[in-house]
Amino acid sequence: MTDTIPALEKRPVGRPTLYDPAYCETVRELGRIGKSVEQICYHLNVSLRTIYLWRDAHEEFLHALDDAKTYEQAWWEEQASSYMVENKESDRLNATLWSRSMAARFPKKYRESTKQEITGADGAPLLTGIQVTFVKPNE
């Protein structure tokens, strides 16, 4: 009779993940009501770092987060058209409030950019050229 040594089981290092595939639908639902990724973290009771680890490790979660961001933006755009009015009796959009809100939440799509150029008088360049003269000493 020969003794055999059982194969060593590989044990995972660290705590087991709290990830649950059911979170994908939760993430989408939270996006549908305008929740940010930070608010999603709050509702799932995990850190932002954990959300990003799950995103990188689980393709279905990556897609759920992408969907949630799209839904979040649509929700906020709908809010703008429905509620960001100048006053209770008005149906006019408060454009300043809407613009600042959208630029803060969705900078890739709504960011205002300003290009500044420094010029001389009447738009002329500040520096038109450099002249270098070499002089021999004692001449």
Image (cartoon, grey):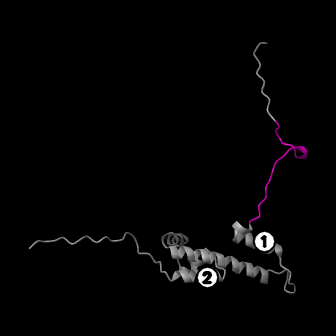
Kind of residue at badge 2: Leu
Q: Position of residue 124 (x, y in %)?
A: 87, 43
Q: Residue at x 59, y 81 (%)?
A: 28
Examine the residues drawn in magenta and state their main secondary structure. loop
Q: Across the whole image, how many numbered discs are drawn on residues?
A: 2
In this view, 135 is above or below 8: above
| Tag 2 secondary structure | helix
Q: Residue at x 74, y 65 (%)?
A: 111
Residue with the mark numbered 1: 99
Of the 4 image quadrants, the one containing the C terminus is top right
Identity of the residue furthest to the bottom in this view = 89
Q: Residue at x 79, y 55 (%)?
A: 115
Q: Position of residue 94 (x, y in %)?
A: 83, 77
Closer-to-camera residue (20/87): 20
Kind of residue at badge 1: Ser
Of the 4 image quadrants, the one containing the N terminus is bottom left
Q: Position of residue 7 (x, y in %)?
A: 24, 71
Which quadrant holds residue 42? bottom right
Which badge, 2 or 1, is on the more N-terminal residue? 2
Q: Is residue 29 left or right of residue 100?
A: left
In this view, 135 is above or below 7: above
Q: Is residue 12 left or right of residue 25?
A: left
- Indicate yes or no whether the magenta region holds residue 116: yes
Q: From which residue to which does the magenta span run?
A: 111-128
| Tag 1 secondary structure | helix
Residue with the mark numbered 2: 30
Identity of the residue furthest to the left in this view = 1
Q: Is residue 89 left or right of residue 98?
A: right
Q: Position of residue 133 (x, y in %)?
A: 78, 24
